[in-house]
Image (tube, rainbow, N blue to C red):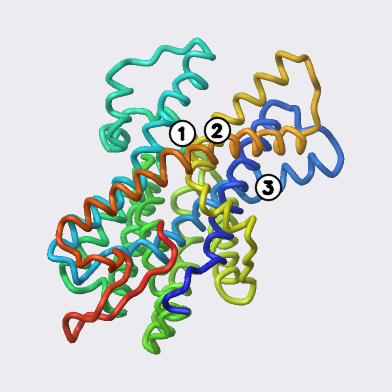
């Protein structure tokens, strides 16, 4: 298993990307009063108001990142941090940059909204939210959390903690404590402090522990993974009540926040153990999932615009299906002609930096007694 690709992780990615599209279309229909009636309306209400299906998918993406990304740090390389930065850059930025002009067309030009050049330039960095500048496409906020996780992985790696179960568990506990303290401050100050950030980082680190137990087979990882999972499950309602227990105009409720995160954790745990699903189509969806995620909001706007232009009243699930197809029509060629060539370019640059020929970036050997040999499977 250690050297094989984990097909069920691709399944999680692919289904999560489709779930984000489903949520955005369903949520739009509910908010605009076009959710139809009967069973479809009831389903949309449950998946947008009782549980946030889109955020369920995002939380599962975070857990997948923890399951996969830390294994891209190559302990054999003379420059592991540099190599990691190169691989992450070529994995994230090229497709992201392509999504920016599409987002400008869909959410600004088509809607007649002004967009300062400074906002566009800031978005090119993927760091715009740290400077308080709006995201051209709303879901970019998750990519900024991803970048912070990369930085955290580097810090833990350099400290020798990323390779240790206790180090991972300790870092996850610190992130959970930060989430609770931030939620407490948010409750008393009435300010939208980003409680989702430390909570997401804790879930990512738990994903790494979960991988160490279920894939790498480290005995010590079992109690650590279960312990951190229990702490997260207990912390979520506390954070939810403190951060969203009263109406502060943030558009969230404590019960939906709790149900969303708990559902995501349960689904991820099941889909990496008892409910492992592997199929060629789902593996392909996993491969193009980054593009599906980035271009899903653009596809949604294209479908809505087409329906308005044609004057059609279309059932909600037909619109959802159409949005998914449009997103696939964009994501598939982007994956083939942008993502894959750029990933290969990154690997060539890394290979030229000193890793012996024929040895992959994601294969890690034991180089020091305290380091654990890691061989990641699914490239993030």
Q: In this figure, which residue is indicated by the disc labeled 3? A: 47
Which circle's residue, 1 or 2, is located before the other in the chain?
A: 1
SS at mark 2 in the image: helix
- The residue under the point 46% across, 13% down is 113
Q: Are marks 3 and 2 in contact (CB under 8 Å)?
A: no
Residue 188 makes an appearance in the image = no
Q: Position of residue 57 (x, y in %)?
A: 55, 52
Which circle's residue, 3 or 1, is located before the other in the chain?
A: 3
| Residue most extreme to the bottom | 219
> Relative to 90, is 6 on the left or the right?
right
Which of the pair 230/166 is nearer the observer?
166
Q: Are marks 1 and 2 in contact (CB under 8 Å)?
A: yes
Q: In this figure, which residue is indicated by the disc labeled 2? A: 297
Which of the pair 26/334 is nearer the observer?
334
Q: Position of residue 326 (x, y in %)?
A: 63, 33
Q: In this figure, which residue is indicated by the disc labeled 1? A: 138
Q: Position of residue 373 (x, y in %)?
A: 29, 79
- The residue under the point 46% across, 61% down is 64
For disc 1, the neighbor class at 10 Å (few under 14, some 14 to 19, many from 20) is few
Q: CA distance from mark 3 to mark 2?
A: 18 Å
Which circle's residue, 3 or 2, is located before the other in the chain?
A: 3
Residue 58 makes an appearance in the image = yes
SS at mark 3 in the image: helix
> Relative to 241, is 91 on the left or the right?
left
Relative vertical location of residue 203 with respect to residue 22 in this rendering, above or below:
below
Which of the pair 45/68 is nearer the observer?
68
Q: Position of residue 142 (x, y in %)?
A: 41, 45
Which of the pair 221/309 is nearer the observer?
309
């Amino acid at each position: 298993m250690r050297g094989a690709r984990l097909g069920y992780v691709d399944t999680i990615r692919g289904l999560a990307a489709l779930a984000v599209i489903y949520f955005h279309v369903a949520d739009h229909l509910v908010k605009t009063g076009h959710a139809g009636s009967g069973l479809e309306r009831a389903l949309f209400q449950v998946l947008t108001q009782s549980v946030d299906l889109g955020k369920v998918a995002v939380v599962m993406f975070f857990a997948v990142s923890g399951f996969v990304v830390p294994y891209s740090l190559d302990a054999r390389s003379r420059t592991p941090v540099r190599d990691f930065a190169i691989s992450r850059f070529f994995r994230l930025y090229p497709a992201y940059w392509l999504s920016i002009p599409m987002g400008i067309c869909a959410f600004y030009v088509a809607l007649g909204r002004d967009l300062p050049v400074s906002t566009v330039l800031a978005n090119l960095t993927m760091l715009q939210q740290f400077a308080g500048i709006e995201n051209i496409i709303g879901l970019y906020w998750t990519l900024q959390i991803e970048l912070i996780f990369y930085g955290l992985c580097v810090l833990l790696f350099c400290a020798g903690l990323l390779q240790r179960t206790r180090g991972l568990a300790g870092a996850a506990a610190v992130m959970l404590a930060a989430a609770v303290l931030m939620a407490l401050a948010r409750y008393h100050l009435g300010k939208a402090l980003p409680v989702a950030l430390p909570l997401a980082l804790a879930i990512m680190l738990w994903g790494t522990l979960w991988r160490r137990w279920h894939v790498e087979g480290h005995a010590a990882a079992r109690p650590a993974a279960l312990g951190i999972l229990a702490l997260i499950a207990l912390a979520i309602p506390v954070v939810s009540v403190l951060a969203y227990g009263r109406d502060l105009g943030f558009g969230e409720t404590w019960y939906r926040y709790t149900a969303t995160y708990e559902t995501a954790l349960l689904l991820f745990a099941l889909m990496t153990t008892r409910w492992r699903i592997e199929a060629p189509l789902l593996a392909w969806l996993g491969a193009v999932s980054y593009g599906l995620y980035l271009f899903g909001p653009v596809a949604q706007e294209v479908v809505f615009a087409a329906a308005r232009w044609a004057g059609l009243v279309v059932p909600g699930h037909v619109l959802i299906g159409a949005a998914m197809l449009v997103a696939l029509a964009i994501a598939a060629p982007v994956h083939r002609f942008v993502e894959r060539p750029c990933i290969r370019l990154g690997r060539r640059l890394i290979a030229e930096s000193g890793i012996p020929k024929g040895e992959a970036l994601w294969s890690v050997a034991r180089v020091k007694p305290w380091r654990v040999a890691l061989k990641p499977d699914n490239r993030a």
